[in-house]
Image (spheres, helix red, strand yellow):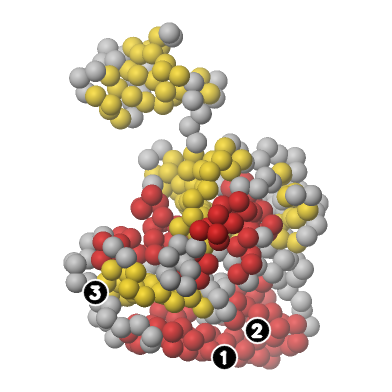
Amino acid sequence: MVFVRYFSVFFYISASFCLYTQTRIRNNPFECCIFPDGYGFFLNNVRFEMRIFVDDGSTNIKLAWVADGEVKTLISPNSFKPEWSMTLLTDSTGPASANYEIDGEKYSFDQLSPDAVRTTETRYQYSDVNVVAIHHALMQSGIEPQPVDIVVTLPLGEYLDENDQPDMAKIERKKANVKRAVTVQGHESFTVRKVSVLPESVPAGFSVLKDLDDLDSLLIVDIGGTTLDIAHVRSKMSGFTKTHCDPKTGVSIITEAVKHALDTSVSTRTSSYFADRLIQARNDDSFLSRYLQNADQRAQVMKVLHEREKALTHRVTDSVGRFAGFTHVMVVGGGASLVASAVKQATGVSDDRFFVSDNPQFDLVLGMVAMKG
């Protein structure tokens, strides 16, 4: 038995007996029981696994984790080409290329490559690039590479079967995919020890649903890069009333059209990442003028963008029209800012019953933390 002097205490096991905490000696985690006089003993040498919540969307990976009692977040774009790249300045403050290998296949992060692997398809959820993208986000998080527990998501259409029950075959397929080993060139890599899977959209509404009265319910409209997930959820997370998933309705409708317009009007093949940046900055004349300097070409690209924006909005509101009986509405996901106003008008709910956050891309992953953290 080893006795130590230790004053930093995190929480109680029993106020009358001892204090319980975790500490490190030479970077090795220990469980420790601390007596009121400041002395204690190590119970055993155990490595505590860190839990990281991952909204592994087709356009961006969103991470959330708890460190020092605070929730930390990170967003990392999905833009990977099937070959390695060379990093010119390893001390550059800009985003450096990162090289990865999975099952003998090589990939690198390159946000500008027009040859980046397409991720705006449902099969992305079970692909090499999905796993690589998660590991790339982990490497950007500042967390020391270590064994971690991961909580990921699946679109409603993949998570649920035709009877609105968890599709265990697809859930297990997702778990097996995420647990595959990824190596990082020149760096230690993360090891995924355990994987849990949650349905998309639903956790985003946790903070609202937990406080609703029994007769209230929430319509959650989750518009991402690839899919539109809509869930009518009863109060207190007691169950689904109805769900709908459209795997072909997402912001990629606009992204692909903008890429095509840049190719034909500006003679520029570009990445989905760059096209998405244009979409995000669609109301920023300074940004648009900087990257589309020719006024006629800029007007043509923006014309296409706005046409596809209207098409996306129509698809979303048409799907929302299939639902009834809800009392509150929440719009989440990377495309929320594009469709929120139209959804509010289509549903007719009052301002105090309509929810869209300042950063809706993080609603899902932060809801996962609130539910499971």
Q: Secondary structure at mark 3?
A: helix
Task: Identify the residue shown where x is 45% and y is 19%.
Answer: 44
- Tag 2: residue type? Ala
Give the CA separation, mark 1 to mark 3: 31 Å
Q: Sequence-wise, which precedes: disc 1 or disc 3?
A: 1
| Dot 2 crowding, Cα within 10 Å, few <14, some 14–19, many 20+ | some
* Alpha-carbon span between mark 2 and mark 3: 35 Å
* Residue 103 percent coordinates (x, y): 75, 49
**Which numbered disc covers residue 307?**
1
Residue 157, given in percent of the width and then of the height, sits at 50, 71
Q: Residues within 10 Å of mark 3 (few under 14, many from 20)?
A: few
Q: Is residue 46 left or right of residue 19?
A: right
Q: Say which quadrant the N terminus sits in.
A: top left
Residue 279: image tag? none
Q: CA distance from mark 1 to mark 2?
A: 9 Å
Quarter of the image holding residue 364? bottom left
Say whether marks 2 and 3 touch (CB < 8 Å): no
Task: Give the percent coordinates (x, y) of residue 49.
Answer: 50, 36
From the image, tell me which residue sits under label 3. 352
Q: Dot 2 lies on which element? A: helix
In the image, 23 versus 221, the foreground residue is 221
Residue at left 80%, top 57%?
83
Horizontal side of 275 relative to 361 (left or right) equals: right
Q: Which of pointers 1 and 2 lies earlier in the amino acid sequence?
A: 2
Q: Is residue 359 visible?
A: no
Q: Residue at x 53, y 89 (%)?
A: 311
Residue type at mark 1 is Glu
Labels 1 and 2 touching (C-beta < 8 A):
yes
| Residue 328 visible to the viewer | yes
Which residue, given by chain and number where applicable, does mark 2 sit on?
257
